[in-house]
Amino acid sequence: MSAEASVGSHAADSTQSAVSPPVFHNTDELRNRGLIGSKYVKLNVGGSLHYTTVQTLSKEDSLLRSICNGGTEVSIDSEGWVVLDRCGRHFGLVLNFLRDGSVPLPEEHRELDEVLKEAQYYRVQGLVQHCLSAMQKQKDVFETVCRIPMITSAKEEQKMIASCRKPVVKLQNNRGNNKYSYTSNSDDNLLKNIELFDKLVLRFNGRVLFVKDVLGDEICCWSFYGEGRKIAEVCCTSIVYATEKKQTKVEFPEARIFEETLNILIYENGRGFGPGGLHLLDSRGSGSSPGAEEEGASGGDRRVRRIHVRRHIMHDERGHGQQTVYKD
């Protein structure tokens, strides 16, 4: 080989070595070359690219700080990107929290839970506590809302009452289920029962589960449950006889309904267990209204107080005379 050819080959080798990236023979050498002593870091988190500083990643004693100081082994591609095998959807939020110390969190519960999982994975404790506080606030707001379940089937009703640890008050109202005409005051009294139900929901929210049933056979009936069984029932409807036809009458025994709601509170937090609690609920209250009668089903602690409007001689409420209506 001539001297000129040798010089040309040496020059080509020098040029190639100048443009070719350095070759690292082990993972530790590659890791240290990419992070230790660097000021900036390029992160590829599940395809989401982020460019930040070592100072930002090292603000908390987290997995990211461990990556920067070489305590955690990572993969770095040929272009110098640190590859993290995680979903990058919320990684920008993690970085912003490290930069600013606070960050707006998503309001949707599922997304907030995803952010919490990412914060726990990267061990960013400040963001973890931030997410937990936001979840607690959402829970507190949710619990202050009065939710009234609507019964759609008898099976659903049984399951709901049996599994509920709170006392249950159910209002069954079905205005259209009537083959007779209504007395003149029945519509007003039906609305008063519904209004009382709403007021009780607001007053005892969180302590009693209130349920509505619009599928049953009764036009207006209150049921009170404790420990999964029916304790009392207040039926607000009766049949009266006019001169030529039968009519349905809806009453509004407000005092008795309120009394039974207070009585059912003895089953709150399991306080109704034992013979003492059952005795209190099975006993007749001193405030029993004179216009009501009780029908008790025998059977020890399975006894249910059923209060129905007493059927009595009354005057027709239709307003076109004082015709007498007789009881059944």
Image (spheres, rainbow, N blue to C red):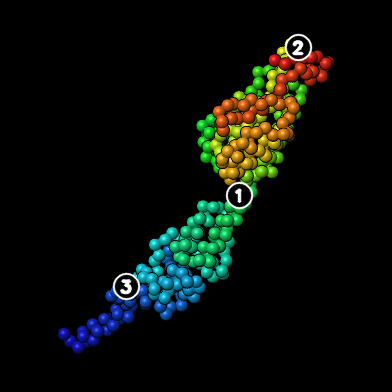
Residue type (three-letter) at the residue carrying disc 1: Phe
Q: Which residue is mark 3?
A: 27
Picture quadrant where residue 84 is located: bottom left
Query: Where is residue 308 shown, x and y percent of the image?
Result: 67, 25
Depth check, front residue: 179 or 54: 179
Q: Residue furthest top?
A: 244
Depth check, front residue: 223 or 57: 223
Q: Residues within 10 Å of mark 3 (few under 14, many from 20)?
A: few
Q: Are marks 1 and 2 in contact (CB under 8 Å)?
A: no
Q: Which mark is residue 243?
A: 2
User: What residue is at 66 percent from the left and 43 percent from the top?
Assistant: 204
* Precedes in sequence: disc 1 or disc 2: 1
Query: Where is residue 87 shown, x and y percent of the image?
Result: 43, 59
* Precedes in sequence: disc 2 or disc 3: 3
User: What residue is at 54 percent from the left and 70 percent from the top?
Assistant: 99
Q: Which residue is mark 1?
A: 142
Disc nearest the viewer among 1 and 3: 1
Picture quadrant where residue 19 is located: bottom left
Q: Is residue 47 left or right of residue 116?
A: left
Residue type (three-letter) at the residue carrying disc 2: Thr
Q: Is residue 13 left or right of residue 104?
A: left
Is residue 311 visible to us here? yes
* Precedes in sequence: disc 1 or disc 3: 3
Residue type (three-letter) at the residue carrying disc 3: Thr
- Assign a secondary structure to mark 2: loop
Q: Which mark is residue 16?
A: none
